[in-house]
Image (cartoon, rainbow, N blue to C red):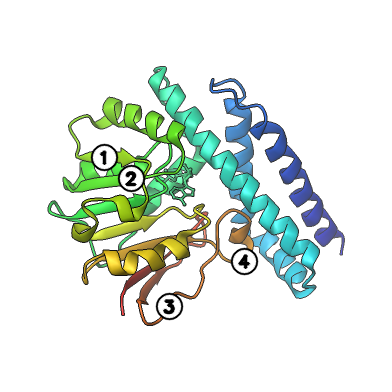
Amino acid sequence: MQALKTFQDCLVEFSEKFDDLAGKYVQTISHCAELEFLIDEYCTFITNERNKAAWEQLERQTSSDLDDLVADLRKKSAHCVTIMEKYRALKLLDGNVEITDYFKNIESCIEKEFGSFQIQADSKVLLVGSGSFPMTLLFITKRTGAEAVGIDIDDEAIELGRNVVKKLGNELNIQLENVSVEELSLIKDVTHIIFSSTVESKYDILDQLYPLTNEHVVVAMRYGNGLKSLFNYPMKEADGQKWRMIEQVLRPDQVFDIALYKKA
Ligand SMILES: C[S@@+](CC[C@H](N)C(=O)[O-])C[C@H]1O[C@@H](n2cnc3c(N)ncnc32)[C@H](O)[C@@H]1O
């Protein structure tokens, strides 16, 4: 019981710290180190085996209070990750390039993302939720020579992202735009699509993509269920008439897992 109380107290404490640090972002790198520390602490919390037991106990109590707390924390942590990418971009553009655990975590997953459906030089990749530091696209295009486009709803993220690409991979074929999937001219030719796990409407966008894309497209949906849903939007059932899940890449030590879909 005490362990459960401590677990719930931790959730409330994280929620307050996210609020505090989100409010301190003023488009400079002040408070960057505090936010990096907090997000690293949160990553450790949601991948900690001991917290899994407390989470499962809490889930069995099924209360709407818990659902509200989880939804609230997910929104706040997603917002703070968006800010952390801005900090990372600002630091890079300022000449500072150290790397935190969160980014190591993301980078370690990129290679395994598409399982047996590997990206090649003639692939065309779309990332939904490219962020201010589009490391997924930088990594993929550098490794494979593929063409890539990232979309994001945040103008500041698009601008910072473009500057990061200019600095780290000006020779790479990466385009970043604040547009919807319907507005992308190359959408019919896209071979691989990746969804960032903190995009709330990712399953609605997957639905929209069905008529827009070609029959061979492969989708990597990043998600987090259970304890990981404190940080990621969870997996949902996709419309079986449209999309079929073909593979699941479970990564117990990493912040999110991946579900691969192809057209049904
Ligand atoms: C954490 S960041 C990017 C993830 C990371 N750069 C990566 O490579 O996986 C998530 C981004 O998703 C964006 N986002 C949220 N909802 C979105 C949507 N409906 N469409 C496009 N981007 C969205 C946010 O603005 C944010 O910049």
Residue type at mark 2: give it.
Answer: Gly
Q: Is residue 81 left or right of residue 262?
A: right
Q: Which residue is mark 4?
A: 226
Structural crowding at the residue carrying mark 1, measured as other residues with C-alpha within 10 Å and reported as few (<14), some (14–19) or many (≥20)? some
Residue type at mark 4: give it.
Answer: Gly
What residue is at 80 percent from the left and 69 percent from the top?
63
Separation of disc 3 and disc 2 at Cα?
Answer: 25 Å
Under circle 1, the secondary element is: strand
Q: Which residue is mark 1?
A: 175
Earlier along the polypeptide chain: callout 3 or callout 4? 4
Residue 150 disc label: 2
Q: Which residue is mark 3?
A: 239
Q: Nearer the viewer, mark 3 or mark 4?
A: 3
Instruction: Compare residues 184 and 74 and report the one nearer the observer.
Output: 184
Q: Quadrant of residue 1?
A: bottom right
Under circle 4, the secondary element is: helix
Q: For the C terminus, give its image quadrant.
A: bottom left
